[in-house]
Image (cartoon, helix red, strand yellow):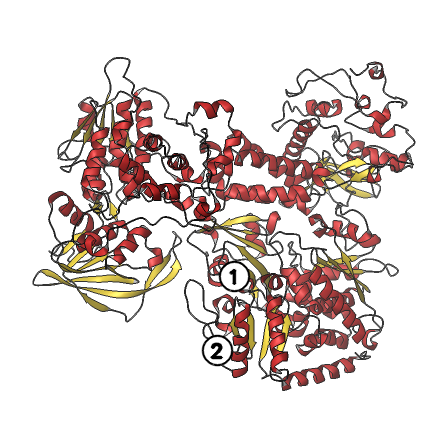
Amino acid sequence: MIELTINGIDISVEPSTTLLEAAQFLGLPIPTLCHMEGLTPYGACRLCVVEVGDPPNSRLVTSCTYPAEEGLRVRTASTRVVRARKMIVELLLASCPQSKTIQDIAAAMEVRQQRFRQENEDCILCGRCVRMCSEQMMAGAIGFTGRGQDRSIGTPFESTSEVCRLCGGCMYVCPVCELRCTYNEPEKAICGGCANLAPPCVEKPQYDDMMCYMQPCVACEIKKD
Amino acid sequence: MRKLTSLDDLIGFRERVTSERQLKAETPTLVVCAGTGGQASGSNDILRIIKRHILEQGLGDKIELRITGCQGFCEMDPFILVEPGLHLYPRLKMEDVPKVIEAALGGYIEKDLIYSEPQVGTMFHSQRDIPFFKKQTRTILGKNQLLDPIRIFNYIERDGYAALERVLSKADPDWIIEEIKASGLRGRGGAGFPTGRKWELARASGDDHQPKYVVCNCDEGDPGAYMDRSLLEGNPHAILEGMLIAGIAIGAVHGIIYVRSEYPLAIKHTMIALRQARELGLLGTDILDSGLDFDIEIVRGAGAFVCGEETALIRSVEGFMGEPRQRPPFPIAKGIDGCPTCINNVETLANIPVIINRGAAEYAKVGAPGNTGTKIFSLVGKIRDTGLVEVPLGMKIGEVVHDIGGGPPGKARIKAVQTGGPSGGCIPAERFDLPVDFDSLKEAGSIMGSGGMIVMDEDTCMVDVAKYFMNFLKEESCGKCFTCRKGTQRMHEILEDITEGRGTLDHLTLLEELAIVVRDTSMCGLGQSAANPVLSTLRYFRHEYERHIIDKRCDAFVCKNLVGPPCQSACPVGTEAWRYVAHITRGEYEDAYQVIREANPFPSVCARACDHACEQRCRAGTSGGDPIAIRALKRFITDRIDPSAYIPVREDWKDGDPPRVAVVGAGPAGLTTAHYLSLKGHQVTVFEAEPEPGGMLYCAIPEYRLPREVIKKEIDTLLDNNINIVCNTTLGKDFTIDSLFEDGFGAVMLALGAHKSRPLGLDNEDVPGVYPSIEFLKAFNLRGEQLAKGRVGVIGGGNSAIDAARTALRQRDVESVTILYRRTRAEMPAFEEEVEAALQEGITIDTLISPTAIKTTSGLFSHLECVRNRLGEPDSSGRRRPVLIEGSEHVIELDTLIVAISEDSGVDSITPARSGGVEVTDWNTVKVDSKTLLTSRPGVFGAGDVVTGPNTIIDAIADGKKAAVMIDLFIRGKELVQPADSLLPIVHIEPVDVDEEEAGADRVETPRASIEWRKRNFAEVEVGLSMQEATREARRCLRCDLEFAERMTQSDKVAGGHAE
């Protein structure tokens, strides 16, 4: 058993427990996006950062990937952590404002607006779909391609996948497209609640004849003009 | 090659090879650098010619040729170094090569081609004395010039593999680790982790059935860094030896050299080196009968900067996309395929044989405590001697930049140095006394990094630098971490907004916050150091950011959208030089005059006496040709069109009686303010101490440069019913600031100018025969007194000195005129044209001389005691300080001495200002707020030379215009804010068709009166251009404004309004 301290609370955990699991065991709230139970932790979204170590050598690490260490001192909501999380949420809103998951996290952290140029993307490259496809559905049809700005999710060489079974698992776990909101003025600040209309499946041709998991949703009955 | 099968075999082999070389030690050898840089400069041609010459002349046994890798003196490529004398012949052309060969054979030096220091001219016969090499400690890099990288024999001749011998004979891996630890070697890849400690951990890590790996990281991704390339190209065996010793120390049998594919020559040389080492039995199984196995393979990178990061490199070696992962676990514990992996930088490994051969204690003597050894830096950018330099850690940055690098290549002052590449930060010139070591650089906000040192000068925009590095990092980020990927993208976006004129102050706050979060939350070093370029430029150059945002200006003339056409941007009053030049090409002279006059109330004056900053920035001049003769073209127009052609827009004062403003000083600043205030309806009274208005224009600038009638005509045009000039009235004697307010003036403007010469501070400065230059000029210009007699000496190097000298030359009783300046001709602040005109007229300029005592005979000035100077260290202005040479005292006999070292407003003017409640400085100028031009007393403004010290006419006019705006706002009770105006053209003038011959023509020569005719009188020396000459010159203009024409709307083009 490994002994460590989180937010001043002493806790003892099995080896290879992550800090996130330990904190969740204690009931401490840590926001996550790319983390999902059942999938290996990836550490892409950086929302779950916590401060470890003692100043001046303390640093922020992602709690979902960091294994518990003997004698570690962890703080889940220090000033540095909160400041980092708020900025990350601003960046998320600046990219994908219409995701309810992101909006809820923003509302919980009291972030009311974002100061960057507004974009409307539908992917934050959290990798949940990739890990779902390869680890849970045992298909491995999609992965990351490209680097930096050009990084995207896709099949090898963008060719039609022979291993994809159209299970819909990737869409099921996506934090951005699972619950979407379209409000009147996308440029304005976020709203608190939303109705989900126009999910992205309507836009993408290959999902036209798929089995839809989203309930309640009447998108397929809405014809595109 | 026969394989060596034991340690004694190797020792014996070395002895044989070394003694063979000794026999040839005195044979003349031509050493040619053929690294990638050398080849790009043309060393392949040099080699071809050498080989052909040797074969044709049958010189095979008389002369040797050694082709080496990069030696580091890249600015001088292609060069030949002749041993044994170490004569360096730089920048050779193909036809000079046979001369060098003959000189080498004959044992003499070819004086026309031997190295001489640029800008200074001293010849150096031996490479050791050349300043670039003298201060370096070339422990590692120096080996490159001694061996041919594709011949293992060369390496062995020079103590190659001697460290391996020592290690094998000790047969104690722990001893190796202790030695490396004792040496204090820190990783040279950037992080500076102690290498001995890393090896110790690697040795202890893992279990017996896991293989261990030694990796050499040669994925040198930093733009501008090429040290590792030069080491791997030039001396690959040193790396192999280092890796061998590392492998023995930590118990590894596999070595991997990870090279980026953009280094084909390094890969080729390494492959050859590996093959030869294997053939000789130094790599493979049971090396030299020791029972140890070690072999090395090469893995190529695929074009990703991020793969220089340890964990990403490991992924790449494993065959995956290079992506970092979280540490712990560290590569020492779990690396390639989960096995312990020790990754070291190329330069770190090159240091290993040195440590083993010399011993750790000797090695640790070089460098600084905690930072032992040397480091190779790539010194590039705006520096005279670009190349690779190797210095002991702890040397000051200033020494590297000035003593080794030679300082700036031109006149622009060095502003900062960027260390550590895109992950590093900038160090401003004020902190060049910082030692170069890991900890000092970190504390200053930068990092050592892999050793890139990019020098930046005044023509580099620091915001643009941050944007450039952010663009690089954005492209190279692997994209896994959301904050790094989006953060670099958004930071680049904000910097783009700022450099294109869309920046706000909120952007700066956002930028800083974002940078800190990116640094805190990214997983690997790329993201963690991505904030450095932004944060360090913000720390030291925040004023540049603010200039871009608030004033919408880029002072380095880099950010195109904030500069517009450079001629307009460079002019302090924003004259649209491109516009009137374009009108001249179309024969529209009246339109041209309107453009000139709109911006400048003194066009004829400036057409003769302006220092034309526009010409210095003219793109025709900066891109290799001659700048357009803008001033001469302005003169062409102002000579033709009468000032009455321009009718300014006037407003009457609404709201009761017009307010009264007092302007003290009728120089260019004062008269400009008066004119613009009168256009707004104010009643202005201008008080002038001298009998005539015009300030320095009248009193100081001589007639042969600026005729009196021109000044008078221009001033008369500006006067109107609202302006009243009162001459012979002096502040402090006839009125005070208090009395002006009591008289009912609503505001006072001080435009007293810098009209008093500064004294030298020597005894006898007030005896007859010694005159301050302004007094001398005033005496002649105002009263016609010719004070100069006989042999005249003028002390100083500025415009006032030249004016005094040329005026004295024309005076009746003068025999000769000599100017005495304490620095060199290159540092003289006077306009280049003026200095040349002075020389043409027969004035002598004596440089590097300073006066020490003024001597008299019978109460009259008779001779001057002087000393000679040499140039020493640069002072805060960047110019080299004059340092007197002991024993150089001498005497110059003269009849008249004119002191023209500098001017200020003089105590007589400053005292009444101070007693009027205005704050003044210690150097006799008035202090004002730079944005509002208000002094410390409410309602009192200051502009022109009285604020800045001696400055140009156009700067005074610009100040005057600004003061008029501010005074008007003040009187109306409004906030003293002037919004920044855009400099982009909003008028489109259709260009004329110009053929190639016209475009490539030489700059027109400004016609001047003949020398003999000039010296006899004070008539104007410069003559105007003819219509043909002017049209031809105007057609050379590159029309930099048309670039922005596409952005204009159709209505702008039709309306033809212009920015105000």
* Foreground pick, A113 / B711: B711
Q: Chain of mark 1?
A: B
Q: Which residue is mark 1?
A: B395
Does residue B26 appear anywhere in the picture?
A: yes
Q: Looking at the image, is B633 positioned above or below residue B41? A: above
Dot 2 or dot 1: first in sequence order is 2
> In the displayed structure, does residue B742 sit left or right of residue B382?
left
* Foreground pick, B870 / A36: B870
The crowd level at tag 1 (other Cα within 10 Å; few <14, some 14-19, many 20+) is some
Give the residue type at disc 2. Answer: Ile
Residue at x 78% of width, y 15% of height? A225
Q: Chain of mark 2?
A: B
The crowd level at tag 2 (other Cα within 10 Å; few <14, some 14-19, many 20+) is some
Residue B350, image x, y percentages: 67, 66
> In the displayed structure, does residue B1008 sit left or right of residue B410?
left
Does residue A8 appear anywhere in the picture?
A: no
* Foreground pick, B424 / B499: B499
Residue B1001, image x, y percentages: 42, 49
Residue at x 71% of width, y 69% of height? B237
Q: Quadrant of the N terminus of chain B?
A: bottom right
Give the residue type at disc 1. Answer: Met
> In the displayed structure, does residue B617 sit left or right of residue B463?
left
> In the displayed structure, does residue A29 sit left or right of residue A220?
left
Q: CA distance from mark 2 to mark 1?
A: 34 Å
Q: Which mark is residue B109?
A: 2
Labels 2, 1: front one: 2
Quadrant of residue B78 within the rendered picture: bottom right
Residue at x 25% of width, y 13% of height? B656
Helix, strand or loop for disc 1: loop
Find out whether the residues at labels 2 and 1 contact each other: C-beta distance under 8 Å.
Answer: no
